Image: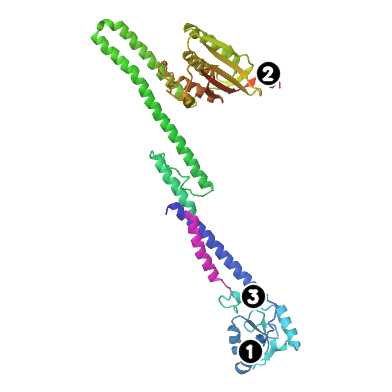
């Protein structure tokens, strides 16, 4: 049992024992008050028998014998009151009860249950019994004839034992899942992210079970991130190995054939540029994943931004006998960072230009949806497309489709960077195959129209 168990157990037990003792004291005080305020006479035949026995004893042995009889009463409260209404044992007797006894003494039908006895010293005593209450008959703890403090030991003891048991049960119920959480966190801290708590929580449906499910979700996300980082490290190592190997081969070649030094230096420079671009893209991607996007408070007119991207892409397309068509007229305004959006959309457009065959066209369309809340941009090519099972994977780092990896000379980071940027602007990016060959990349961005912005500014 851990420390938390004993803390739960101790405080629950103390609270329950305190409650039991308080209830016992209240019960005792209330019982005492009821006994003192009893105003009903016992007129039963057995009461008459007690009264006659008391009369005979006082005649034979005096008031001491009567006092002993009164003290020895088990379930009945016997009173002997003198002419001054003082009880022989000095107890408080309700005046109403004394008055009822005097009235009963005058009634022939009840006089046998009440008697006035004259002691040898000449003192007269009115002897009668108070009616026993049902709760006194059922709970005869201690001496009911004693009007002093009465404490129900057996009920309190029973309650304490029950409290002990239930305190242990409740402490165990709370401490067990917390102990499992502690072990699971220790396991995760040591590198084991396979630990799961939902199954161990059983059928619990409380906050601790919710915490266990949150822990499972956390470890699953951590496991995904760790696996992603491992895969990224593997892919980076693989991508860097190829240019480094080519550089080493070029150096070895120039040692054997010094006359090829200019061509070798050119090859080494080309591989250096490729590695520099790879490292730059990785740093850019890492900043995006870490959330370092800079200020995102620019109001960007998307038609102007798209036109600038298309103008730049025209030069690249013309050099390789490819064409661009566009329909981008819109009044969409997007809040964000123009430099990032330019980079994301340009990556998608340049990727389409690379994949579409010569003498074919890349189509760029932008339109505001009917609710004026989103701008939809589609970039379509006439290339080989992507197998259906790879459509989601093309946005992962270093992924190259099986249909294009032989012809592609990139590292597979362009679409990954584009996705991070679009998501940073609250948008989505998806890919689908066209029915008549080719790939269509769709970008949806939250926007407002320039008319709405003007009305808001005027307001």
Which residue does the numbered mark 1 point to in the structure image?
Answer: 54
Q: Give the range drawn in magenta.
A: 147-172
Which residue does the numbered mark 2 point to in the structure image?
Answer: 451
Q: Where residue 400 sits: x, y (%)? A: 43, 21
Please tell me which of labels 2 and 1 falls first in the chain: 1
Whether pointer 2 and pointer 1 mark residues with C-beta atoms closer than 8 Å, the reply is: no
Q: Where residue 152 sits: x, y (%)? A: 56, 71
Between tags 2 and 3, which lies in front? Answer: 2
Q: Residue at x 47, y 21 (%)?
A: 386
Q: Which residue is drawn at 55% across and 14% down?
A: 363
Question: Which label was assigned to residue 134?
Answer: 3
Neighbor class of circle 1 (other Cα within 10 Å; few <14, some 14-19, many 20+) is many
Magenta residue check for 50: no
Q: Residue at x 54, y 9 (%)?
A: 311
Number of numbered discs present? 3
Q: Which of 312 and 459 is in front in this view?
A: 312
Q: Distance between the residues labelled 2 and 1?
A: 110 Å
């Amino acid at each position: 049992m851990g420390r938390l168990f004993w803390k739960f157990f101790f405080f629950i037990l103390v609270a329950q024992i305190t409650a039991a003792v308080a209830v016992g004291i209240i019960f005792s005080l209330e019982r005492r008050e009821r006994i003192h305020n009893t105003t009903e006479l016992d007129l039963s035949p057995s009461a008459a028998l007690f009264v006659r026995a008391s009369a005979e004893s006082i005649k034979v042995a005096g008031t001491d014998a009567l006092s002993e009889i009164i003290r020895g009463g088990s379930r009945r409260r016997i009173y002997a009151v003198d002419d001054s209404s003082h009880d022989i044992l000095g107890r408080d007797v309700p005046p109403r009860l004394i008055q009822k006894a005097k009235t009963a003494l005058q009634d022939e039908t009840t006089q046998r249950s009440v008697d006035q006895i004259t002691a040898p010293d000449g003192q007269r005593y009115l002897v009668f019994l108070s009616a026993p209450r049902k709760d006194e008959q059922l709970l005869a703890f201690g001496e009911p004839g004693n009007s002093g403090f009465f404490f129900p030991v057996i009920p309190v003891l029973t309650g304490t034992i029950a409290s002990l048991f239930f305190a242990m049960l409740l402490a165990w119920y709370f401490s067990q899942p917390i102990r499992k959480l502690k072990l699971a966190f220790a396991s995760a801290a040591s590198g084991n992210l396979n630990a799961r708590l939902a199954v161990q929580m059983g059928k619990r449906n409380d906050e601790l079970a919710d915490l266990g499910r949150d822990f499972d979700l956390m470890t699953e996300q951590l496991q995904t991130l760790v696996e992603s980082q491992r895969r990224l490290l593997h892919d980076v190592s693989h991508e860097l190995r190829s240019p480094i190997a080519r550089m080493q081969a070029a150096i070895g070649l120039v040692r054997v054939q010094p006359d090829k030094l200019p061509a070798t230096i050119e090859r080494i420079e080309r591989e250096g540029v490729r590695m520099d671009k790879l490292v730059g893209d990785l740093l850019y991607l890492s900043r995006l994943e870490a959330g370092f996007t800079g200020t995102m408070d620019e109001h960007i007119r998307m038609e102007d931004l798209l036109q600038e991207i298309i103008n730049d892409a025209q030069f690249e397309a013309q050099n390789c006998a490819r064409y661009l068509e566009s329909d981008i007229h819109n009044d969409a305004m997007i809040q964000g960072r123009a430099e990032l959006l330019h980079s994301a959309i340009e990556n998608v457009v340049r990727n389409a230009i690379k994949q579409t065959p010569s003498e074919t066209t890349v189509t760029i369309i932008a339109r505001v949806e009917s609710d004026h809340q989103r701008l939809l941009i589609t970039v379509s090519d006439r290339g080989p497309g992507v197998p259906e099972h790879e459509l989601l994977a093309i946005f992962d780092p270093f992924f190259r489709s099986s249909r294009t990896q032989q012809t592609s000379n990139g590292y597979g980071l362009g679409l990954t960077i584009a996705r991070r940027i679009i998501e940073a602007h609250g948008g989505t990016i998806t890919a689908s195959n066209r029915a008549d060959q080719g790939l269509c990349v769709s970008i949806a961005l939250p926007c407002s129209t320039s008319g709405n912005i003007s009305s808001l500014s005027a307001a």
